[in-house]
Image: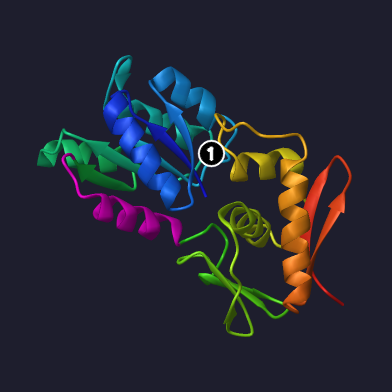
Amino acid sequence: MRILLVEDQPEMASALRVALTRHDMVIDHALNLSEAEIFAADGNHDAVVLDRRLPDGDGLSLVPKLRANGNAVPVLVLTARADLADRIAGLDKGADDYLAKPFALEELLARLRALLRRPVNMRSDVVRVGRLAFDLTHREANVDGNALELPRRELLVLETLVRRMGRMVQRGSLMEAVFGLDDDVQPNALDTHISRLRRKLTDSGAGVTINGVRGVGYLLRETP
């Protein structure tokens, strides 16, 4: 899961980044509106956590720009501006949720889960293919009801492939879903994670396979 965090206060940004990373989220951090627009342009984020008081303007101004560009990414506004009028303005601008500072981390995580549990064009929070079931809400995988224990990176790879089941996921998109921009990534890191995941899917009898096209990307398919 990839989150765009737009927050200019270093301490707050650092705390949020650590907390969200511990919950298997990949974080891109923008310090201001200009950086946020650059990050958001690729359209590969699953949610945006957005402060309002930014050095170059009101964070809310980002939301209409996203919507105008056809980007329906869920936006959670996180700000000290908590008056009723501010909350109404945020929602009217197109934000999906509004959380006032100070806040409890548990509530932020719960609100993010609520936003993320409704993936576009999916009717169920559990995707089933072969003997594999992936719970998008709780971010858990199982084979015939038996938990498939995966390290964080492999889980992110599987989640990304499941969300685009049957379609080729470009290598760059997988890299963006699994690694943060600040991560020190070795050239073959993605291939290593996919190789290990492919072996575990086979060993568990999941009934799915990961097919790759060299230099292009990967897709998840049910085993014939």
Rendered residue at 44%/18% (across/down): 34
Query: What residue did someone put label 1 on?
Result: 70
User: Which stretch is magenta?
Assistant: 101-117
The residue that appears at 40% across and 35% down in the rendered structure is 5
Q: What element carries label 1?
A: loop
Outermost residue, left direction? 83
25 and 47: which is toward the camera: 25
Q: Is residue 207 left or right of residue 183?
A: right
Left or right of 157 in this view: 104: left
Residue 204 in the image: above or below residue 116: below
The chief SS type of the magenta part is helix
**Residue found 52% across the figure and 42% down from its top:** 45
| Residue 127 picture location, percent across and down | 60, 71
Residue 152 spot, x, y in % from top left: 56, 54
Q: In which quarter of the image is residue 211?
A: bottom right
Examine the structure image and report whether residue 55 is included in the region drawn in magenta: no
